[in-house]
Image (cartoon, rainbow, N blue to C red):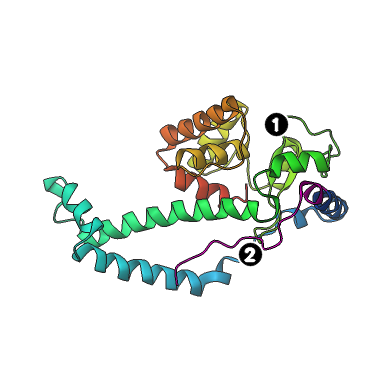
């Protein structure tokens, strides 16, 4: 049976979404007063080790089969030969594995974006703004640069935080980071005064899977942000999304 994206069998009305988010925000506002770590929980890395191992084996097996069988992949490999010096170094099944891995990254990015729409549809930011006017971490009024943050990646909606509030619970992000990729992205973010949500939206848009709709100017800025990170770091848009996911941004 082919994959079917999970969809909400009982979609909420706009009023129900806002009311749900009001309760949701108050729930986390209460937690933030005693334990801010509850706003940034991550599942242990080994929790899905067996599942990821099976996926990895499937990628290897399918890549081997597709690289040696007539079809789109075989035609693509033939139409895009390697430079002579690399011909003996990169086997076709490895090239196919790399292509499949990239396709999987883009698929994961699109599907993860779709999980935010399970409860809220495409109005997450707008509904969050209607549900609360202040940052539940700092208490400050939420400005136009407020950021959507996922306390836990289990399908629950994001919460809207100020930049200061977001930074306070993302202690792993620092301008003194030893990671050159992270330093580069942080530098670009400060330079553009952009948000993580904007970077995510730009990457998704450039991959052909746009997220929450915004104005044309806002979407153009998001794409420009993503392109600047791409040019500076040489990371693909899917890799940038994977980094944002790893950091729970």
Q: Is residue 70 above or below residue 51?
A: above
| Secondary structure category for the residue under label 1 | loop
Residue 135 visible here: no
Q: Position of residue 156 (x, y in %)?
A: 71, 57
Q: Is residue 59 left or right of residue 154?
A: left
Q: Is residue 154 left or right of residue 177?
A: right
Foreground: 152 or 219? 219
Q: Quadrant of the N terminus?
A: bottom left
Q: Give, as a single range, the part of the protein colored magenta.
A: 1-18
Q: Quadrant of residue 143?
A: top right
Q: How many marks?
A: 2
Residue denoted by label 2: 43
Circle 1 residues within 10 Å: few <14, some 14–19, many ≥20: some
Which residue corresponds to the image point at 53% horizontal and 41% vertical from the top-left?
210
Q: Position of residue 226 (x, y in %)?
A: 50, 35
Q: Is residue 159 left or right of residue 230?
A: right
Q: CA distance from mark 1 to mark 2?
A: 28 Å
| Secondary structure category for the residue under label 2 | loop
Determine contact: label 1, label 2, CB under 8 Å: no
Residue denoted by label 1: 145
């Amino acid at each position: 049976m082919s994959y079917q994206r999970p969809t909400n069998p009982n979609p909420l009305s706009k009023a129900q979404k806002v009311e749900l988010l009001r309760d949701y925000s108050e729930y986390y506002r209460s937690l933030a007063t005693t334990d801010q770590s509850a706003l940034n929980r991550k599942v242990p890395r080994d929790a899905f080790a067996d599942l990821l191992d099976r996926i990895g084996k499937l990628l290897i097996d399918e890549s081997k089969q597709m690289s040696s069988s007539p079809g789109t992949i075989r035609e693509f490999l033939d139409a895009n030969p390697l430079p002579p010096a690399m011909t003996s170094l990169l086997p076709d099944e490895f090239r196919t594995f790399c292509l499949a891995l990239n396709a999987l990254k883009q698929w994961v990015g699109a599907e993860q974006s779709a999980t935010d729409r399970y409860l809220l549809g495409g109005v997450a930011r707008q509904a969050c703004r209607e549900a609360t006017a202040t940052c539940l971490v700092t208490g400050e009024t939420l400005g136009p640069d407020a950021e959507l943050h996922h306390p836990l990646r289990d399908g629950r909606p994001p919460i809207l935080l100020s930049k200061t509030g977001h930074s306070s619970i993302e202690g792993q992000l620092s301008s003194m980071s030893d990671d050159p990729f992270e330093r580069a992205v942080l530098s670009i973010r400060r330079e553009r005064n952009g948000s993580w949500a904007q970077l995510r939206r730009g990457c998704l848009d450039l991959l052909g899977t746009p997220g929450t709709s915004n104005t044309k100017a806002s979407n153009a800025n998001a794409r420009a942000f993503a392109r600047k990170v791409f040019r500076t770091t040489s990371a693909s848009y899917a890799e940038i999304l994977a980094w944002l996911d790893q950091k729970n941004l």
